[in-house]
Amino acid sequence: MLFAKTLFTFLRKTHKTPQKAGFSSWLAALLIYSITTQMKLSNKVLCAIVPTVAAAMLISAAVNFRTILSNQQESTETTQLLLSRKTTSQVSMSLDNLVEELDWIAQRSEVQTMQWDAMSAYLARKASACSDKFSMLMVITPTGDYYVAGRGFIEGRNLADRAYFKTIMEGGAASAMTSPDFSKSTGEMKYTVAVPIKSAEGATVGCLAANVGLSTLSALVAQDTVAGGGFIWALDEEATVIGCADRSLLMKCNLDSIAPKGRGVEVISSAVKQGHEVAGYVTMPNGDTFFATCCPIEATPGWSLLMAVSDSQLLSVARTTFLQSVAMLVVMLIVVTILVVLLLRRWLSHPLDQLSCAIANVADGNLKVDLNELNENRGGDEVKAMTASVKLMCERLSRIVSDIKVGSDLLNSSSQQVAELSQSLSSGASRQAENVAALTSTTAQMASDIRLNYANTRNADSSFSNSYTRVAELAERLKPLFAINNDIARQTSIVGDIARQINILSINAAVEAARAGSKGRGFAVVAKEVQNLAGLSRTAAEKIEQLTADGIKLNNMARQVFSEAMPSMDQTNRLIADISRSSSAQSVSSEQINAALQDLDSFLRTNASNAQSLAENSENLDEQAKRLYDAVEFFNV
């Protein structure tokens, strides 16, 4: 019961269903978890042996490591100091060789003559042959004038004030060496070596000097290398780097500038300036720690050789020895572990293998496992408890799988029926949506036509109303015209009467003029003209009267036409207004019908979409039901 409780508690915390991690892995993980949390027999044995052996290994390794590290560090420091002295001696010998080679050149007879014509060819050959050692060969006369090999006499310059010249010519030294500086003519970083030129009688007749580039000194220093990221520096009397593998540090790096950013560097710098030997640990500005040894170089103006080796290199041998000790302890632990495993295999592993086979059968779907034989051969230990828990688990799983099989059959049948109904519903909803969509399109077209008719009717009504109003106004304005025409006719008849009266008067005047004889002759002429005018007036009056009569007839006809047309136009105007009102009502009704059909179309489309989704979900449900049925068929109950 305890194992079953632990099993289902872990199941709830990790996976809700076994399918997520694989059934066999799920059961194996639950079994291991239950064993480790309950501290079974195998765990107790291993927890008693392994920590004890591991603690013994750690204590032994720590003691050995500290002892080995202390001894090895002291031995390596002594060896490194001896190596530094040896390297310093080799560099000193190399510098002496340069002086000896320069002295050998000075002893040549061609040079001892101090005649430039005699020695120029020889010096040019030696300068070319020794170009890797000497960057410039100079022969200096007792007055300070000098010749340069390959170039000849240098005019306008004098070297009598140089320290090495005074050391040779005035001090009588066998050789002289200067501190490094920059050449004034070439800008080269160099130092100068000088030896005396003596005659056959042994008198000093001049000085042979050579510029030696710091690259040559760096090549001499770089002949010996330090493993593990170490370095070798040649330092002058001011603790400035004058020789190293990294040429970018030459004449630029000084220990005094490094000391504030590091630790222990100031001790090395002080020893260099004092010309003492020193050894100790230094930390560079980048954080790297080195064991540094500094030894003065003999026969130089206070130069020293600094050799530094990384502290990790010093400890490499100790680490190797320590690893060998650890390897031996690991071998011992492996031997002890093998013995423990053999005992546990006999007492625990074999029964657990049988139980594992039973669990594997469960993982393969066979829930009909027989654990009675294994349970009978055990006593009252933990394996028996696990066997009982696994048996109980198989029985419960068997009942659960049987119930799932029955449910999956029912779910499969129901899902198929739902799928058929949803397909039918989806097909009907789709057809309805298509029909309503077509009807909506037709109704929308009808509504558009009705709106167009309504607009045309309103335009016609407006146009006809305006025409009717203007015609009525025209009829009203023509009434005064009719009266005026009648007045004109009356006035025209009066003019005709007047013209006739004037004609009669002209005739009477002509008769009276005839009676008067010669005295009335002029009056007869006037009477004649008045008669002519009266005739013309009568003719015009008759024409005007005829035209006025015609105008009156036309006015009467127009008045009759207006009188007959006005009632018809008034009736037409009322009919057009009625048509406009009817078209407006039809337009509103068609818009309402179209909106209702659009709502119905949207509703049917939504129903069709929902029906389609229902059909797809029902198909998915049917597929899931089949998968569930197939999954349950895996088990044999």
Image (cartoon, rainbow, N blue to C red):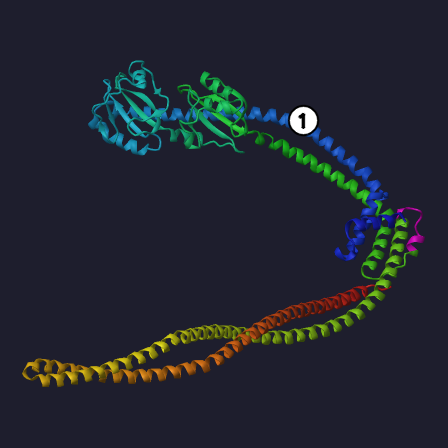
Query: Would you call the spot at circle 1 few (<14 residues within 10 Å), some (14-19), or many (20 or more)?
Result: few
Query: Which residue appears farthest toward the left when viewing the image?
Result: 518
| 219 in relation to 540, above or below | above
* Quadrant in the picture for residue 90: top left
Question: Image quadrant of residue 523?
Answer: bottom left
Q: Amino acid at mark 1?
A: Thr
Can you tell which quarter of the image residue 437 is in? bottom right
Q: Position of residue 21 (x, y in %)?
A: 75, 55
**Is residue 378 shown in magenta?**
yes
Q: Report the side of 235 relative to 369 (left or right).
A: left
In this view, the residue in front, 133 or 630, is 630
Q: Which residues are magenta?
A: 373-382
Disc 1 element: helix
Tell me which residue sits at (80%, 51%) in the image.
11
Res. 346 in view:
no
Q: Is residue 96 visible?
A: yes
- Closer-to-camera residue (385/620): 620
Which residue is painted at 73% across and 30% down in the image? 59
Q: 424 and 36: which one is in front?
A: 424
Q: Nearer the viewer, residue 297 or 41?
A: 41
x%, y% of residue 458? 50, 72
Position of residue 395 measured from the top left corner of the image (x, y, whole percent): 89, 58
Residue on which the image places disc 1: 67
Residue 450 to residue 89: above or below = below
- Based on the picture, tell me whether residue 549 belongs to the magenta stretch: no
Q: How many marks?
A: 1
Q: Quadrant of the C terminus?
A: bottom right
Residue in the image at 49% along x and 81% along y: 568
